[in-house]
C-alpha cells in the first residue's frame, strides 16, 4: 500500500503557495497610477511623478496624489504622504537627507545634493559604493550599512538606488515548483529588511525614496531590471506612504519603452542620458533624475517655501565613498562648501579626448534612458567603458 499522506501534504502546501502568489498578483493589478507635477528651484523646471495607490496601505494612511501632469512624461512612484505634518526648515535647521546606492548614486547623488543644497535648507550626505547591490555583499553589505548610517546620521529622508548590479541574479530556477523563482524569495527578503531599516521604528518614520533600476543596454540585463523593479515596487506598496518607489526604468525609456541613450526629458529636450556602456548616467541624465527627486522632496517638505538661497549648503561624502564614477573624469565635489555660503573653487576641466563632452547647468529651482541639472565639479566623460555601476 502506498502512503500518500506526505504527497498530499506537499500538494496542499504547494497549492497554498500558488494561491498566495495569485492573490498577490491580483492585488498588484489594482495599482492606480496618478501624476505629480512640481516646479524646480529658481527657474520653473517642471518635474513629474506618478503616484501608486493601493486599497489598504500598510500604515493605514489613505494614499493621496499630488497635482496633475502629463501622464506620458512621468515616472511612476509610490505615494508621497501629504497628510504628514512637515516641519519648518531653515538654514540652521535643514532637512537631513541621505542619498545612497551603487555608482549610479555616485553621479545622481551629487546632482541632487547641489540642487537641494542651493535652497539653503537641505543638508545632504552621499554614500555610494561602485559595483555594490543587495544580492551580493562582496562590495558592500547594504542591509548592515543601512543600520549603521541610520543610527549614526539619523536622516529624515532617504534616497536609495541599487539594482543594476543585481540583475545577474534573476533566473527561472524554482526548486520547490511553487511558481516563485528562488532568487526572488531571497531578494525580496533583503529588499524588505533594508526598507524597514531605512524607515526605522521611531515616532516619526523616515520617508524613503527607493529608485528602481533604469533601463539597461543589453537584453538580458534589461529583462533582469524589470524583474528587480517588480519586486521592489511590490515591497514599497506594502509600506504605504513610508516608501516611495520611483520608476527610474520608465523615466529612462526611449519612445518604444526600451533602452535608449537618448530620451526626452522633463523639459521637453532630447538629451543623451547614458554613457556608451549602457548603464551609467551622463551628467544630463543624472540632473534629469535629480530634478524629479527634488520635486518629490519639495512636495513633502516644501523646500521652495522655506528656501534661503543666500546661504546654500554643500553636500558631503560618507566614509567609504568618493570613488571615480564611470562617465566622469573626476571624483564628485560639491558646488557649495558644506558649511554653506561660499561656493567652492570651480574645477578646471580639460576637454575630454574621447567620449561625450559633459555640460554644466546652473541649478534651478521603470526601465531604459535619461536627462539635465547642475553639477560643476562633475564634468567631462570617460571613453566608453564597461565598468559595473
Image (cartoon, rainbow, N blue to C red):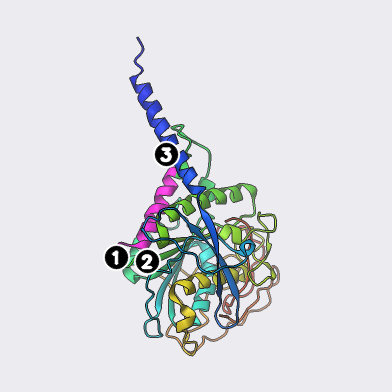
Range covered by the magenta-colored residues: 185-203
Q: CA distance from mark 3 to mark 1?
A: 31 Å
Depth check: give the residue in front, 174 or 169: 174
Q: Which numbered mark, 3 or 1, is in the foreground of this view?
A: 3
Residue in the image at 70% along x and 58% along y: 255
The number of callouts visible is: 3
Depth check: give the residue in front, 369 or 352: 369
Q: Which mark is residue 202?
A: 1
Residues under numbered marks 1 and 2 in contact, where contact means CB atoms less than 8 Å apart:
yes
Quadrant of res 376: bottom right
Of the 4 image quadrants, the one containing the N terminus is top left
Residue 313 shows in this picture:
no
* Residue identified by numbered label 2: 206
Q: CA distance from mark 1 to mark 2?
A: 8 Å
* Residue identified by numbered label 3: 20
Please tell me how crowded label 2 is: few (under 14), some (14-19), or many (20+) other residues with Cα within 10 Å: many
In this rendering, the answer to whether 361 lies above or below 207 is: below
**Nearer-N-terminus badge (3/1):** 3
In this rendering, the answer to whether 74 lies above or below 363 is: above
Amino acid at each position: 500500500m502506498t502512503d500518500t499522506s506526505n504527497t498530499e501534504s506537499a500538494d496542499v502546501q504547494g497549492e497554498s503557495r500558488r494561491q498566495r502568489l495569485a492573490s498577490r498578483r491580483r492585488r498588484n493589478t489594482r495599482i492606480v497610477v496618478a501624476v505629480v507635477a512640481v516646479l524646480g528651484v529658481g527657474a520653473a523646471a517642471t518635474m513629474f511623478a506618478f503616484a501608486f495607490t493601493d486599497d489598504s496601505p500598510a500604515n493605514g494612511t489613505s494614499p493621496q496624489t499630488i497635482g496633475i501632469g502629463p501622464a506620458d512624461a512621468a515616472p511612476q512612484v509610490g505615494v508621497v504622504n501629504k497628510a504628514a505634518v512637515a516641519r519648518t526648515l531653515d538654514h540652521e535647521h535643514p532637512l537631513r537627507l541621505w542619498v545612497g546606492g551603487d555608482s549610479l548614486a555616485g553621479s545622481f547623488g551629487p546632482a541632487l545634493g547641489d540642487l537641494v543644497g542651493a535652497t539653503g535648507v537641505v543638508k545632504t550626505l552621499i554614500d555610494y559604493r561602485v559595483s555594490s547591490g543587495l544580492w551580493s555583499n562582496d562590495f558592500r553589505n547594504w542591509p548592515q550599512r543601512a543600520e549603521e548610517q541610520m543610527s549614526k546620521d539619523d536622516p529624515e529622508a532617504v534616497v536609495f538606488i541599487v539594482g543594476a548590479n543585481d540583475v545577474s541574479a534573476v533566473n527561472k530556477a524554482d526548486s520547490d515548483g511553487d511558481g516563485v523563482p528562488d532568487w526572488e524569495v531571497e531578494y525580496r527578503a533583503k529588499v524588505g529588511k533594508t526598507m524597514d531599516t531605512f524607515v526605522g521604528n521611531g515616532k516619526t518614520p523616515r520617508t524613503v525614496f527607493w529608485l528602481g533600476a533604469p533601463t539597461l543596454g543589453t537584453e538580458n540585463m534589461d529583462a533582469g531590471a524589470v524583474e528587480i523593479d517588480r519586486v521592489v515596487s511590490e515591497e514599497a506598496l506594502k509600506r504605504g506612504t513610508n516608501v516611495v518607489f520611483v520608476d527610474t526604468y520608465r523615466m529612462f525609456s526611449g519612445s518604444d519603452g526600451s533602452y535608449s541613450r537618448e530620451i526626452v526629458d522633463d523639459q521637453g529636450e532630447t538629451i543623451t542620458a547614458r554613457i556608451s556602456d549602457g548603464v551609467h548616467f551622463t551628467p544630463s541624465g543624472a540632473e534629469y533624475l535629480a530634478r524629479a527627486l527634488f520635486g518629490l522632496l519639495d512636495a513633502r517638505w516644501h523646500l521652495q517655501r522655506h528656501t534661503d538661497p543666500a546661504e546654500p549648503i554643500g553636500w558631503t561624502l560618507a566614509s567609504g565613498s568618493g570613488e571615480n564614477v564611470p562617465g566622469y573624469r573626476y571624483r564628485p565635489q560639491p558646488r557649495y562648501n558644506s558649511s554653506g555660503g561660499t561656493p567652492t573653487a570651480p574645477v578646471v576641466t580639460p576637454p575630454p579626448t574621447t567620449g561625450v563632452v559633459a555640460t554644466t547647468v546652473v541649478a534651478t529651482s521603470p526601465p531604459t534612458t535619461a536627462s539635465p541639472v547642475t553639477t560643476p565639479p562633475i564634468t567631462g566623460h570617460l571613453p566608453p567603458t564597461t565598468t559595473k555601476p
